[in-house]
Amino acid sequence: METEAEPYVRLASLRRLHQVLADLNQTRSLADTLQSVADGLVALGYEVSAVNLVRPDGDLVVAAVGGDPTAEAIMGGRVGPREAWERRLHMGVEWGELRYIPHSEGWVLDDDEVPQTHPVVPPPSAPGDWATGDRLFAPIYDAGRELLGVLSVDKPANGRVPTPWGREALQMYASQAAIAITNARLRANMQRALVRLEREQQALRASEESFRQAFEYAPSGMAVAEMGGDDHGRLIRTNDALCRLLGRQPSSLRRLSFSDLVHPEDVGTLLRTFAEGGKAELRLARRDSTYVWVNLRNSVVADAADGPRYLLTHVEDIEERKRHEAQLAHRASHDSLTGLPNAAELRARLTARLCDRPPELYTGAVSHSAAGLPGPRGRAIVGAGAPARGEVDSNGHGFGPDGAEEQQWGGPGPYEHHVHAMVPEGGGGESAGKGLAVLFCDLDGFKSINDRFGHNTGDAVLIAVAQRLTHAVRDGDTVARLGGDEFVVLADGLTPGGAEDLAVRLRNAIIPPIRVDGRAVRVGASIGTGWAMCGTSTEEILSSADQLMYREKRARSQGRSHRRAG
């Protein structure tokens, strides 16, 4: 039955509970909150209190102790295994969420690993008195009913086991303590996250500044381009080195992409490089419409959420290296004295024009032309311009016996797009066939100039002859120095009559006097005209033209002898 003083006791307890909760809610850090929880338990009327907090590994640590410095020294920081705490919370009397273990069951706790103290209280003198060894625990949970920790109290100030009202007050306090601890943890986590974020932002700003300086002041060109979308490939940022290299302003480059700048012949290389990454060597246009050789190296800049966003491109000027490589290639393939293609380059160009299929595979019959090489026989030139079998029209197509177009030279295969070189037939008219003429030219009288005036004069003569031959041929024809005073001209698309006319032009170009060191010297030329033909080796073709040249040289020598004898 409720006594007359009971309402006043409840009111006083409610006031104390209100005050400790107000004090609890004023704390900010997690450590202060835990200590405030322990001190609040003392304010509620318990002389010894402890806050046991669950650690990340599941065990519980004594995070705060209130009311008794000796107990704090003994228990502070000690760890109790989770299993031991689980056993303890399943013992004793259940007061709602609370667990009361009377001293009569204390023997069970003797070997327990849970940190605890044993404050001494006066022996019980009446039922309901608190005894040494009594234990009272208040588990605290988060919103998901996960255990946050356990509040433990001992030695009530009034010496009595808590009444139902005292138990309810302790339970209410435990619930509010759980909220306060959760909030304190959230604040602590947020503060740590903010500190970490600030550090990351500082590192990012430092990284961005380092990148900006490295980008802007790099000695070679750098660019950032868009990836994907309608603006794919558009330059959004360029450094000073790239602007200087291309002779353009940053504002003008930002309206362009690399595809707008690349040489038309290098567009495919650029697209493959952007698609596959890596690097490539290609030419970019300067403002003055000239091109510069560069080495592009691409790196994809990806976003964690959206994937690839930008393309970072390093542009290295390799114009000097390319020029040096071209010079080396030119020296390897050209005569150092005259600048003409040398014998190796001549053979390479001639070989590139030929295939190894002999003519009988596509003509059906073989004869020998005046050049001493196998040639097709029985090819009729149809009057209205219809090609005969084995001929090739302007598109490189072949024709059958009845003039019907067929796959060139026998259908699909390695020669499907190859225009075969053949010995032309007919005279010099429009109906004559055309072929690749090989004119072998040997200078007459050159040895005597060398012997009489020395090699310097001889070299000057060779240079002059090379220039005259180059001016006498058509664009696209090849004039090469085979060695010594021997030159070879490759002229494609000539009829027999056209080849004879070219030989006359070459001879006439050589005959005029050549002035060297104030004196005039003169050389002549013997020219043998052969024809290149698929299925014949380069050496056979050059040898045949050489033989024809010597045949002409002997004939000209015999003619001069007869004239002197007459």
Image (cartoon, rainbow, N blue to C red):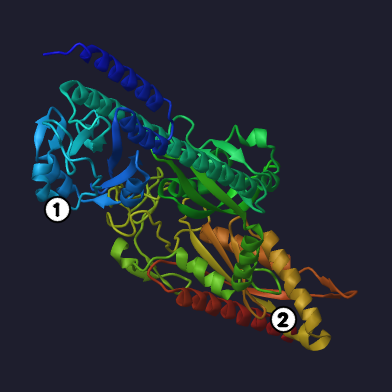
The percent position of residue 41, horizontal first and vertical second, equals: 30, 31
Q: Mark 2 Cα within 10 Å, few/some/many (few <14, many 20+)?
A: few
Q: Which residue is drawn at 21% across and 33% down?
A: 138
Looking at the image, residue 438 sits to the left or right of residue 470; the answer is left
Looking at the image, residue 90 sits to the left or right of residue 69; the answer is left
Q: Residue 328 carries which label?
A: none
- Compared with 24, 224 (above or below) is below
- Compared with 130, 448 (above or below) is below
* Residue that carries the numbered disc 2 in the rendered image: 563
Q: How far apart are marks 2 and 1 (CA)?
A: 144 Å
Identify the element where label 1 is drawn: loop
The percent position of residue 156, horizontal first and vertical second, equals: 25, 33
Between 397 and 298, the one nearer to me in the picture: 298
Image quadrant of residue 409? bottom left
Question: Residue lying furthest front in this view?
Answer: 125
Quadrant including the N terminus: top left
Image quadrant of residue 37? top left
Query: Which of the two marks, 2 or 1, is nearer to us in this view?
Result: 1
Looking at the image, residue 263 sits to the left or right of residue 512; the answer is left
Question: Residue lying furthest bottom in this view?
Answer: 451
Q: Residue 110 carries which label?
A: 1
Circle nearer the N terminus (2, 1): 1
- Compared with 441, 155 (above or below) is above
The percent position of residue 340, horizontal first and vertical second, equals: 65, 68
Q: Mark 1 Cα within 10 Å, few/some/many (few <14, many 20+)?
A: few
Q: Residue at x 54, y 45 (%)?
A: 203
Quadrant including the C terminus: bottom right
Query: Residue 281, can we see it?
Result: yes
